[in-house]
Image (cartoon, helix red, strand yellow):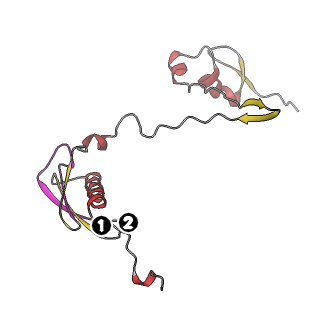
Amino acid sequence: MDTTPDLVTCDWCKSPVSKKKIDKHKTLKCPNAPAEIIAARPKPQKQVGFRVKIKDGNLTLFYPESPAPDRLPTTPSPQDRQINHEATVTRFGDGVFHVYRVLSSGGSWNHPLEVECKFCHRTIKVNADGPLNMPQFAKDEACRLALLEHLRMDDARPYHSPAHSTPN
């Protein structure tokens, strides 16, 4: 029984490679691959091991910290580009807010919305200005802005029902 793998010849570097690994060889390892394939290869990451420090006869190992991942993508999504970062929120009463200019494109339609505060469990009423067919992400942004203003201005203490109170 023959245990050697079936070998094929790479078209670019003419080296023998296993049939199972020829695709991986061409995309990741072949030195004579076309420039487009070489440019698309993932950059090799630097292998960092631990450091050894000897102090007072004790051996201490220091492991490097992994780099922190990016928190946000570098390019904003199309939805992010439509949100107006200078939107204003006005408080009209206890739990009633009006959000002006949610979208950069503006709009003159009033959209009545409601959202529950997860902290105090009160229903917040939101009136948001926007176009007639305001997308859901803009409505969510208006509710988020109103909730932030509610938490900043209103007395938003956590609600404790009498059923859950402890006897004295």
Residue 8 left/right relative to 67: right
Quadrant (top left/top right/bottom left/bottom right) for the N terminus: top right
Contact between marks 2 and 1 (CB within 8 A): the answer is no
Element type at mark 2: loop
Q: Is residue 114 above or below residue 30?
A: below
Q: Residue at x 75, y 30 (%)?
A: 52
Locate residue 73 relative to residue 138 in the image: left or right. Answer: right
| 56 inside magenta stretch | no
Element carrying mark 1: loop
Q: Amino acid at mark 2?
A: Phe
Q: What is the distance, in whole Å, between disc 2 and disc 1 at their CAs?
A: 11 Å
- For the point 77% across and 31% down, which residue is it? 55
- Residue 102 forms part of the magenta stretch: yes
Please tell me in which quadrant of the rendered image residue 81 appears.
Answer: top left
Give the mark nearer the N terminus: 2 vs 1: 2
The residue at the point 58 percent across, 17 percent down is 33
- The residue identified by callout 2 is 119
Q: Residues within 10 Å of mark 2 (few under 14, many from 20)?
A: few
User: What's the magenta region?
Assistant: 96-114
Residue sitting farthest toward the right: 1
- Left or right? Give the position of 150 relative to 58: left
The image quarter in which residue 10 lies: top right
Amino acid marked by disc 1 = Asp
Query: Which mark is nearer the camera, 2 or 1?
Result: 1
Q: Around disc 1, counting alpha carbons within 10 Å, would you say few (fewer than 14), some (14 to 19), or many (20 or more)?
A: few
> In the image, residue 115 lies at what x, y percent?
29, 65
Q: What residue would you read off at disc 1? A: 155
Seen in the picture, residue 61 relative to 160 is either above or below; the reply is: above
